[in-house]
Amino acid sequence: MGIGEYHDPASKMNHGGADSRGSTSTPLIFLCVGAVGSLAFLINAGRTTPKPLLLMMGLWVLSPFVALFVGHVLSKRWSASVRAALRNVMVIVSLVSLAFYALDTVRHIAGKPAAMYVLIPPVSWIFIAVVAWMAFRSDKRSRPRAKA
């Protein structure tokens, strides 16, 4: 298996195998590390920022991670392919966010220190929405249609 590829417990159960619950915990670990790390980078970058503004920025930076966690909780009834896409997005958003925030800590890529923290969340939201739309659309096309 490559990076971002996860075995779905439901697919193993459908083939008569045992349930392997460990596979869904890896993306959750990535998600938690991504959220905590992103918040830590923000707090480091915003040391001189007024606390109310820093709090609002913290909520903004955490919003994609919260959305992905809610998606994970709601995904129990989704198909295996949609859940796999969600897990992949959890890992990608976590790694990319941390990479950009770390790079911004070393050298301000966007010019102003706060720019990365304002820009990454909406880009993450767009990525999440596009992948979700594609996964659900693909899932609907792959299901056999009921005859009337």
Image (tube, rainbow, N blue to C red):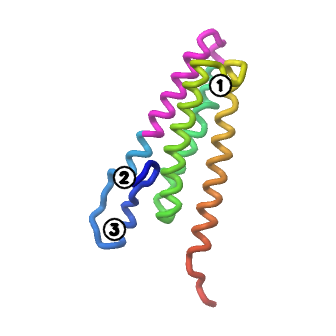
Residue at the far left: name it.
18
Which quadrant would residue 54 be assigned to in this image?
top right
Q: Element under label 1?
A: helix
Question: Closer to the camera, 65 or 109?
Answer: 109
Q: Element under label 3?
A: helix
Q: Dot 3, how many residues are within 10 Å of its Cα: few (below 14), some (14-19), or many (20+)?
A: few
Q: State whether residue 110 appears in this view.
A: yes
Residues at circles 1 and 2 in contact by the CB criterion of under 8 Å: no
Tag shown at residue 13: 3
Identity of the amino acid at label 1?
Met
Which residue in the structure is indicated by mark 2?
23
- Residue at image coords 57%, 18%: 106
Report x, y in % for residue 73: 48, 51
> What residue range appears in magenta?
30-53
Identity of the amino acid at label 2?
Ser
Report x, y in % for residue 26: 39, 45
- Residue at image coords 38%, 47%: 25
The residue mark sitting in front, 1 or 3, is 3
Which residue in the structure is indicated by mark 1?
56
Report x, y in % for residue 104: 61, 23
Residues at circles 3 and 2 in contact by the CB criterion of under 8 Å: no
Left or right position of 88 against 10:
right
